[in-house]
């Protein structure tokens, strides 16, 4: 209860000192100055590692993989190499207790990129905020030059192990093997090992499991031929490997969707970590494990069991039944194959747009220009350092701020610079160029969704490039609907920025807000207030930009700029419209089939009754009525649709013909709707029964033991029969085909019917008058 | 009697039946032919059915009967709500055809079973219940312009007759004076080819609402004392009862006196007997009895016969609504007596059953009430 005496004393003492007026006890400016010193960026991030996406062990593992893969893809694309990336996660504590929440992992990412020249290795991997991508406006995955070095730093902090880099920039020379540890104080790397080696790609990785050995033997894994140059990064870190949302697996799956040109091989660790609640869990127990199978996965687990009583397989195998933790199958190597062999179009680097610049930046640019070229004129500066400023515009701007075209940038004082900045805001410029953007493309989006999501309907849309803060960007969206997707859960939103999947902080992301903002009820989907729509739906949004505004350095969410959200909404709405057109068409088809069902159900009965009454050929009458039923149901439904909802455009009528839409008829026939084939079969069956005269024979007539055919009507004139018969196959080719399949029932010979009873009066009522019946023209003429 | 049994006799009822059947048969065939014709012409098959609604009922003031107007409704095959009805119509048309050919008749219920089976290829039954079947048969009656008996269909027996008359029913002579306490059941079909009047001494017909009252009259031998025929219709009289009354009235010239409850229901029964009903307006010609007289119970009887308070049955809201509707019928609207009678009922605020007269004395109704009314010609028409 009472604090320990020591503490009491201390408190009392400090109270005393507080009261004491003695200044010497307090910090002085001098003493404070002694403690004031530089904070290195590395130190800052070491303390604030959550800013970089290393908040928890699970995310740390993901971020490490993500940064390495992003770098690899960027490097390959820039060098014009089709990326072939191998991701290996080794569990270094396979014998840890089953309940262990985390473990030590060794993450290795090998690419076939251009490699890194020796002298840059320390800078790239050992320094934060060092990179090629920060200073330019070009679309790339990485931006700040933080990622991979931060991952290395995290590894060093948690395990004390340096980062290991193998890189071979020149195919004919040996590779470099460098191990480096980052000094957070100096923001510099300390090289602990630096040797040359021929071991690239590292052979060790191919010998991890029976599966990897087999794949390597087949040339599928780290084939030296495909990795003539390249880089391999190995980081040991404390992490947690668990599948599900926000996992390495999901990241690679989504990366494969957005980068169909890349081949990615993933060798996961032998076991998952113990389950733990975190922001993206709960994970569905067995379901998510099999999620990988949604993709084209080469899972050669089957190969393992037979040839190899492998030692590697041993530790996990007995654990499988015993361990209460989620234990996944061992040695399953996942391969995301390359879907297209074309690299994304090369993007151009652009200069900043005058509208997207701030005053401080402008001043900085002016200062840099001074240094860059003595005697640099403002006129030239404006044209060369900005996009969309022509010579005429440049001179107009010079004139506006009261300087001549030969005025040097050195002569631009602060006031003039500010005036220039104001002019930037007021003047009109064309939007920034958009050839700096490489959108995924509607076709590729659809292909990616098709590969990744089992649905029935896919739609994609691509917006034209737009501008936020002077930076061009482009939004693409795609949706997948129906099929095997869960119908009563909120739609899954998958987000990409410059082809990089965003896995965390969904609700903070502009794209998710755009999904929530969009009124999906307009497209016949359920949508609770202020949330994503509920239904069998996957929504994908991709933002391509020279500079994606992330909310934090961990690059998890896109900042919510009005312009961006608006474009996203427009893209989603376009997809929504396509979806609605499809759903409505589907509903219409369902209604139509129900109606048709009703009619077809009764036509058989009617035909039987009528043919018994007046001896009409049941087959012909049935066909004729069926034909009408089919025609009428289409017409009736059209009217109903017009009454119900207004079909806006003609295009919507046939979403299947629309661009950017895929409908998988095979995925699942329209829900709770009897497939047409089935109905046709039934119709054909009834028709055959009618023709054979066996229709409804299972029902016993109450009175007359055998349904007596109407004998009155003699055979219709043969001439008409011939005409009808010849017309039949033309008008109903489908029927004809069906009948060919069904055992051909003998056509009902009209002549076989008993002739009219002589003497019986045959009359009919025509316009209220009874007329004697012997005019065959009344009968169907 | 023997003469009647010999069926092949030419010119007799049998020949008439043959001829009538041939016509009905032809009507059915033409119904089917019409469907075939429409179908092969690429038109939607339809059956024209005269509408049996109040709006299509015409009050023939001159003749004092309700008649059906000319409005018809097309029953369409390709209409979601009518497709099944269409099928049922054709099934029944076929059933009737086979009945005519077999020269047999079926009850309404029999017809329901005759048409009942599972629609091929489904689990659906052709008729959900008998009421569906009955409605279709009424549709066919009006659509074919043939009466129920012409379609070889009869209804359940309902109603009883006793009195000074001898009839021949399907060749059997029936002396209605020797019917004991039960009386002779009135069949559904009482057409001249089934029932012929042979010998009638009765001077009028007393039709009472229910068999309880009828039993009272029979036990007191009212028909013997007053030389009449005593009938009851079990509430709303069936077509058979109404047709029989109509024939007694038309063919034998007997006046028809009705003793019904003093309530809107009783008034409505009288209205149906006298003018015909809306749903059977097409049969009014042979069912309505414009001469029928309503002798009671009258709303004024409560006072004139000094009935006790106990017989009062309060009018419900439905009763009041119904009474006002009946008062607005064209055939009652211009009838001062009826307007007064219904106004009396409403101002009384209660209804009375015929049995209420029993409170006076067991045989008050047979010995005092009715004879007195008849003597004083105190009735409404």
Image: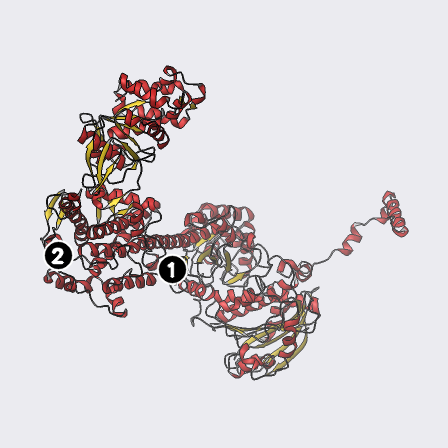
Can residue B67 be seen at all in this image of the molecule?
no
Placement of the C terminus of chain A among the 4 image quadrants:
bottom left
Pointer 1 residue: A661
Is A132 on the left or on the right of A391, as rendered? right
Residue A367, placed above or below residue A262 = above
User: Callout 2: few (<14), some (14-19), or many (20+) C-alpha neighbours within 10 Å?
Assistant: few
Pick the residue in front: A46 or A404: A46
The chain containing the residue under callout 2 comes to: A
User: Callout 1: few (<14), some (14-19), or many (20+) C-alpha neighbours within 10 Å?
Assistant: many
Can residue A598 be seen at all in this image of the molecule?
yes
The image position of residue A397, as x and y in percent, is 45, 49
Q: Earlier in the sequence, mark 2 or mark 1?
A: 1
Is B118 on the left or on the right of A10, as rendered? left
The image position of residue B51, as x and y in percent, is 24, 38
The image position of residue A515, as x and y in percent, is 48, 52
Same chain? Circles 2 and 1: yes
The chain containing the residue under callout 1 comes to: A
Is A299 on the left or on the right of B364, as rendered? right
Q: CA distance from mark 2 to mark 1?
A: 65 Å
- Find residue A211 and report its image quarter: bottom right
Pick the residue in front: A316 or A553: A316
Is A233 on the left or on the right of B2, as rendered? right
Figure disc tally: 2
- Find residue A178 and report its image quarter: bottom right
For mark 2, give the secondary structure: loop
Pick the residue in front: A297 or A287: A287
For mark 1, give the secondary structure: strand
Pointer 2 residue: A757
Residue B84, placed above or below residue A725 = above
The image position of residue A455, as x and y in percent, is 44, 61
Specify how the rendered protein is coloured. Answer: secondary structure
């Amino acid at each position: 209860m009472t604090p320990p005496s020591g503490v009491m004393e201390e408190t009392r003492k400090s109270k005393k000192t507080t009261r004491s007026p003695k200044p010497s006890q307090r910090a002085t400016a001098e003493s404070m100055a002694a403690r004031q010193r530089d904070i290195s960026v590395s130190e800052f991030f070491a303390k604030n590692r959550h800013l970089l996406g290393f908040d928890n062990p699970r995310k740390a593992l993901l971020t490490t993989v993500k940064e390495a893969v992003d770098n690899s893809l960027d490097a390959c694309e820039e060098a014009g190499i089709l990326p072939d990336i191998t991701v290996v996660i080794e569990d270094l504590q396979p014998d840890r207790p089953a309940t262990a929440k985390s473990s030590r992992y060794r993450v290795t990412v090998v690419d076939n990129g251009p490699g890194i020249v020796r002298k840059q290795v320390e800078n790239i991997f050992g320094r934060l905020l060092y990179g090629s991508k920060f200073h330019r406006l070009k679309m790339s995955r990485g931006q700040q030059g933080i990622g991979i070095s931060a991952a290395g730093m995290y590894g060093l902090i948690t395990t004390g192990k340096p980062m290991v880099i193998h890189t071979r920039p020149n195919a004919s020379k040996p590779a470099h093997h460098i191990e480096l540890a980052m000094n957070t104080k100096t923001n510099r790397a300390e090289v602990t090992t630096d040797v040359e080696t021929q071991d690239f790609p590292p052979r060790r990785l191919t010998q991890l499991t029976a599966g990897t050995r087999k794949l390597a033997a087949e040339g599928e894994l780290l084939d030296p031929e495909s990795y003539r140059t390249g880089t391999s990064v190995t980081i040991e870190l404390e992490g947690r490997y668990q599948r599900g949302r926000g996992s390495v697996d999901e990241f690679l799956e989504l990366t494969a969707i957005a980068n169909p040109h890349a081949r990615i091989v993933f060798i996961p660790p032998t076991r998952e970590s113990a389950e733990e609640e975190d922001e993206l869990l709960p994970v569905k127990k067995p379901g998510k494990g099999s999620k990988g199978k949604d993709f084209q996965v080469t899972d050669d687990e089957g190969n393992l069991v037979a040839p190899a009583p492998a030692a590697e397989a041993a530790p996990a195998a007995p654990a499988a039944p015993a361990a209460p933790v989620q234990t996944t199958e061992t040695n399953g190597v996942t391969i995301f194959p390359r879907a297209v062999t074309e690299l994304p179009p090369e993007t151009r680097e652009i200069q900043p747009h005058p509208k997207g610049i701030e005053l401080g930046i402008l001043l900085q640019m002016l200062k840099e220009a001074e240094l860059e070229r003595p005697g640099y004129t403002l006129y030239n500066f404006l044209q060369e350092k900005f996009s969309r400023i022509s010579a005429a515009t440049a001179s107009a701007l010079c004139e506006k701020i009261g300087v001549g075209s030969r005025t040097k940038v050195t002569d631009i004082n602060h006031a003039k610079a500010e005036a220039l900045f104001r002019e930037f805001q007021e003047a009109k410029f064309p939007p920034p160029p958009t050839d700096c953007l490489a959108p995924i493309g509607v076709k590729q989006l659809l292909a990616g969704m098709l590969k990744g999501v089992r649905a029935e309907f896919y739609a994609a849309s691509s917006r034209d490039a737009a501008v936020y803060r002077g930076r061009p960007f482009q939004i693409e969206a795609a949706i997948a609907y129906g099929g095997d997707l869960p119908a009563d859960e909120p739609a899954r939103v998958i987000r990409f920025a410059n082809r990089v999947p965003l896995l965390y902080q969904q609700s903070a992301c502009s794209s998710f807000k755009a999904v929530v903002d969009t009124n999906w009820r307009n497209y016949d989907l359920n949508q609770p207030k202020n949330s994503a729509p509920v239904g069998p739906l996957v929504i994908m949004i991709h933002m391509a930009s020279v500079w994606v505004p992330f909310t934090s350095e961990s690059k998890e969410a896109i900042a919510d700029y009005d312009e961006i959200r608006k474009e996203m909404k427009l893209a989603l709405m376009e997809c929504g419209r396509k979806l609605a057109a499809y759903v409505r068409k589907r509903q219409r088809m369902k209604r139509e089939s129900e109606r048709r069902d009703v009619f077809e159900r009764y036509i058989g009965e009617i035909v039987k009754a009528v043919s018994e009454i007046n001896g009409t050929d049941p087959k012909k009458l049935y066909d004729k009525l069926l034909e009408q039923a089919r025609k009428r149901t289409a017409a009736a439904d059209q009217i109903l649709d017009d009454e119900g909802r207004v079909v806006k455009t003609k295009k919507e009528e046939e979403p299947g013909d629309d661009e950017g839409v895929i409908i998988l008829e095979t995925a699942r026939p329209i829900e709770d709707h009897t497939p047409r084939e089935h109905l046709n079969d039934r119709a054909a069956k009834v028709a055959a029964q009618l023709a054979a005269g066996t229709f409804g024979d299972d029902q016993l007539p109450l009175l007359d033991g055998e349904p007596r055919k109407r004998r009155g009507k003699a055979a219709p004139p043969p001439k008409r029969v011939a005409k009808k018969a010849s017309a039949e196959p033309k008008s109903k080719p489908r029927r004809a085909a069906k009948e060919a399949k069904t055992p051909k029932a003998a056509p009902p010979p009209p002549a076989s019917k008993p002739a009219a009873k002589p003497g019986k009066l045959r009359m009919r009522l025509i316009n209220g008058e009874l007329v004697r019946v012997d005019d065959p023209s009344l009968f169907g003429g | 009697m023997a003469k009647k049994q010999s069926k092949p006799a030419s010119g007799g009822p049998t020949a008439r039946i043959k001829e009538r059947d041939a016509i009905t048969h032809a009507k059915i065939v033409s119904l089917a032919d019409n469907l075939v014709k429409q179908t092969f012409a690429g038109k939607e098959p339809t059956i024209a059915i005269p509408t049996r609604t109040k709006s299509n009922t015409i009050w023939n003031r001159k003749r004092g009967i309700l008649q059906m107007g000319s409005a018809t409704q097309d029953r369409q095959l390709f209409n979601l709500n009518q497709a099944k009805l269409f099928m049922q119509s054709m099934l029944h048309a076929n059933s009737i055809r086979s009945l005519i050919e077999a020269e047999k008749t079926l009850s309404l219920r029999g017809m329901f079973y005759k048409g009942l089976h599972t629609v091929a290829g489904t689990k659906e039954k052709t008729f959900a219940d008998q009421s569906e079947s009955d409605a279709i048969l009424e549709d066919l009656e009006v659509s074919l312009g043939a009466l129920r008996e012409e379609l070889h269909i009869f209804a359940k027996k309902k109603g009883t007759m006793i009195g000074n008359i001898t009839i021949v029913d399907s060749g059997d002579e029936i002396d209605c004076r020797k019917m004991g306490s039960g009386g002779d059941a009135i069949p559904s079909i009482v057409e001249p080819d089934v029932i012929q009047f042979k010998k009638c001494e009765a001077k009028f017909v007393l039709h009472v609402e229910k068999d309880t009252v009828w039993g009272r009259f029979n036990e007191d031998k009212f028909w013997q004392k007053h030389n009449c025929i005593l009938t009851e219709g079990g509430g709303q009289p069936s077509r058979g009862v109404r047709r029989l009354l109509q024939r007694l009235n038309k063919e034998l010239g007997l006046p028809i006196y009705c003793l019904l409850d003093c309530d809107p229901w009783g008034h409505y029964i009288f209205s149906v007997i006298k003018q015909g009903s809306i749903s059977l307006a097409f049969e009014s010609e042979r069912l309505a009895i414009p001469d029928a007289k309503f002798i009671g119970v009258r709303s004024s009887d409560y006072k004139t016969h000094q009935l006790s308070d106990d017989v009062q049955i309060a009018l419900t809201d439905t009763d009041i609504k119904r009474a006002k509707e009946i008062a607005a019928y064209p055939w009652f609207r211009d009838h001062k007596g009826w307007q007064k009678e219904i106004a009396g009922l409403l101002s009384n605020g209660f209804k009375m059953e015929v049995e209420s007269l029993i409170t006076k004395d067991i045989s008050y109704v047979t010995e005092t009430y009715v004879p007195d009314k008849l003597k004083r010609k105190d009735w409404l028409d």
